Amino acid sequence: MYRPRAFAEDRPEELRAIMQSCSLPVLVSTTRDGGAVRMVATHLPLMLRGDTLVGHVARANPHWQTLDTTAESLAIFGGVNGYVSPSLYATKKETGKVVPTWNYEAVHAYGRLEIIEDTARVLAVVSALTDHHEAPRTSPWKVSDAPDDYIAAQLKGIVAVVLHITALHGVRKLSQNKTPADRDGVIDGQTVENPQLAEHMKNVSKVGGRLGSP
């Protein structure tokens, strides 16, 4: 991950917050297929549990079938992001020396990928993921709401994956290398163009998210 000093994010609590805000990360692994070394990627929900990430993939997915267990896997998490026009900077009116950029947050999680086929453990992963995503709903659905034989049949079609995290690398690029006037201009402009980004920039600044620290 390319991490200029101004944008490097290393605080564990901030890295975890970015990861938890990403609904669909990408899992990337090295595979060995017929002797050839390749990269394979799968988009899937991953839940952070301690120092691990848990999820599941289709049994038919070649990602796990050809996995090189001697190599690291990588989970990529993308947070709030958006295009920033030079027109939003106060500096545009002063010197014109501005160019477009993109504000974003991202975390790369590295580690060993464990494959789980044991039915009871796969069920535990599926149940935990379901409970996590159903929690905000008024009437949460539970795995136990479905017939046992139906769930048993569905479990045969998946395997659970657990990434045992060994390293986290994060980047948070939210105009913190700009002047206060330019940052305020970005926030004002994004309030109209990308309200989610504008609100996030304001919130990060309030909690000491390094905005204003080059």
Image (cartoon, helix red, strand yellow):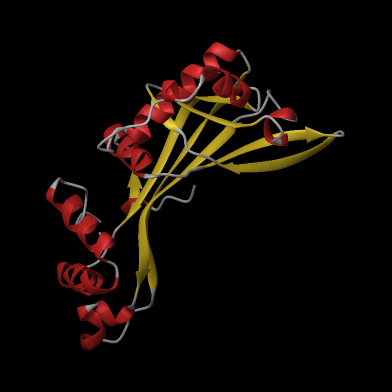
Judging depth in this view, the residue of 102 and 25 nearest the camera is: 25
Q: Residue furthest right?
A: 34
The residue at 24%/65% (across/down) is 195
Q: Where does residue 115 sit, x and y in percent of width and height?
A: 62, 21
The residue at 43%/20% (across/down) is 144
Res. 52 visible in picture: no
Q: Residue furthest left?
A: 206
Judging depth in this view, the residue of 33 and 108 nearest the camera is: 33
The residue at 60%/30% (across/down) is 72
Q: Where does residue 170 sit, x and y in percent of width and height?
A: 39, 43
Q: Where does residue 132 sit, x and y in percent of width and height?
A: 35, 30
| Image quarter in which the C terminus is found | bottom left
Judging depth in this view, the residue of 213 and 76 nearest the camera is: 76
Q: Is residue 65 above or below residue 199?
A: above
Q: Quadrant of residue 159?
A: top right
Res. 59 visible in picture: yes
- With 163 as the anchor, is 190 left or right in this view? left
Q: Quadrant of residue 59?
A: top right
Q: Is residue 36 above or below residue 184?
A: above
- With 115 as the anchor, is 104 left or right in this view? left
- With 63 as the anchor, is 213 left or right in this view? left
Q: Is residue 89 above or below residue 153?
A: below
Q: Where does residue 150 sit, x and y in percent of width and height?
A: 57, 24
